[in-house]
Amino acid sequence: MTFKTVIEPFRIHSVEPIRLTTEDERRAALAKAGYNVFNLPAKEVLIDLLTDSGTGAMSRDQWAAIQHGDESYAGSPSWEIFHAAVTNLFDFAHVIPTHQGRAAEKILFSVIGGPGRSVPSNTHFDTTRANVEFTGATAVDLVIAEGHDPKALHPFKGNMDIAALETFIAETGAENVPVVMLTITNNSGGGQPVSMANIREVSAVAHAHGIPFFLDACRFAENAWFIKLREEGYANADVADIVREMASYADGMTMSAKKDPLGNIGGWLAMNDPELATQCRNMLILTEGFPTYGGLAGRDLEAVAQGLSEAVSHDYLQYRIASTSYLGEGLTKAGIPVVMPYGGHAIYIDAREMLPHIDPLQYPGQSLAVALYEVGGVRGCEIGTLMFGMQPDGTEKPAAMELVRLAIPRRTYTQSHIDYVIEVCTEVKSRARSLPGYRITQGPKVLRHFTARLEPVI
Ligand code: F0G
């Protein structure tokens, strides 16, 4: 007998209080925060779906691993445990620990980027794009057409457009393309997976031109679970083996251990090329730390190592993906437009469709994110023109999609929390016509969505 309810495969061991506030309090908090939810104090947020990055609950065994941490400067046993856990899934010759994903990106692109170079991906995450562009190189997104259509029901909407990649390499010149990347799952494109067939093909195209192929593998376990569920030939495969196969086509990877590896902090850069590894390690020593701890404490290395073994558990992944879908189904039933199919780590509300009266350059996604907080204390994140609209030449143009991401921290919220979120979204939908656009009053040129201040356009 199998039951239809997919339960949390854990029980709660330690709890954190969360605080209800009034709508008036939240309105005041928003004004103080310059209508940017990144500026809100977390203690004034009830359900925090800003990100799934570093916000998950660690397991009993991870906390125990923290106690086991060894803080030796060089050659710590915690490094050996971390290294073994990483290479058990991603068998690259060189593993370079960093404090989080963007540190790995910074090091990699400082070495291989630079003016005149171009780096294609399915969709670069914002920090990846920023780190590429910071070196003077160009970041190019080549996701399949379905990836731009919130309604298209493609099982692997994160796939790269292979023909576009071929054309891109021919036009740019292989010598100007230092790496081809794939983000798994494709975060900025809706948390959509990439198929094993596509990973294989991207690898083949890159290698045919002598270009290395790297994975941005933050959500590798969720991607592997989708391959198991949706791709022919993998239904009976073990997720760990699917991960090993994905890694086998790549020459290296960047990783934020704050996502699927279930850490609160951590990351790494890995590769097979020994010369590239030497250059990256030199940068690591300059900016992060000694090669056996990078930017991390020994205890963090151990927490991530333990997290990696839990991340590929089938019970965990079944629960993880089912609980994200539960939010998606609830919103769909309430008539709220969301990116389909439901993503792995998040549900993305289509703000362009929900708030058609707001001009893209007045940030409909931001308006929706502000309303979700105002109405119910729920914090989501705009992934639209505020995040992506600023061009390197200082002009602004509408992003491909105007989304609000409701990211689900791992193992943190229960079904009743999610039922509450669905109710809040439903109430916001009923107020949709009255929601204003926004203008920026203050903001930096790079990664402005983190710190910009805005005001409603009334
Ligand atoms: N790549 C992807 C696909 C990401 O989603 C992130 C972070 C990074 C790289 C950078 O890693 O945060 O450890 O430096 N994404 C977070 C998010 C911030 O909310 O999606 P980091």
Image (spheres, grey):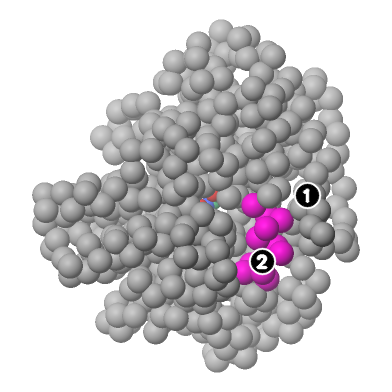
Check the image and report above or below for 219 versus 250.
Answer: above
Please report the residue visible at 53 percent of the width from the left and 82 percent of the height from the top: 88
Q: Is residue 427 left or right of residue 439?
A: right
User: Which class describes the residues within 10 Å of circle 2: few (<14), some (14-19), or many (20+)?
Assistant: some
Q: Foreground residue, 402 or 206?
A: 206
Q: Is residue 194 left or right of residue 351?
A: left
Please report the residue visible at 39 percent of the width from the left and 31 percent of the height from the top: 399
- Tell me where residue 295 sits by quadrant: bottom right
- Tell me where residue 424 sits by quadrant: top right
- The residue that disc 2 covers is 314
Q: Is residue 203 left or right of residue 298?
A: left
Q: Residue furthest front?
A: 1
Q: State the extent of the magenta-drawn residues as a range.
A: 310-321
- Residue 227 % position (x, y): 50, 59
Check the image and report above or below for 390 versus 2.
Answer: above
Q: Are marks 1 and 2 in contact (CB under 8 Å)?
A: no
Whether residue 399 is in magenta: the answer is no
Check the image and report above or below for 136 versus 363.
Answer: below
Prevailing secondary structure of the magenta residues: helix
User: Quick one: SS at disc 1?
Assistant: loop
Please report the residue visible at 77 percent of the width from the left and 68 percent of the height from the top: 59
- The residue that disc 1 covers is 4
User: Disc 1 and disc 2: Cα gap in Å?
Assistant: 16 Å
User: Quick one: SS at disc 2?
Assistant: helix
Q: Which amino acid lies under the numbered mark 2 shown in the image of this protein? A: His
The answer to whether one can see residue 306 in this image is yes
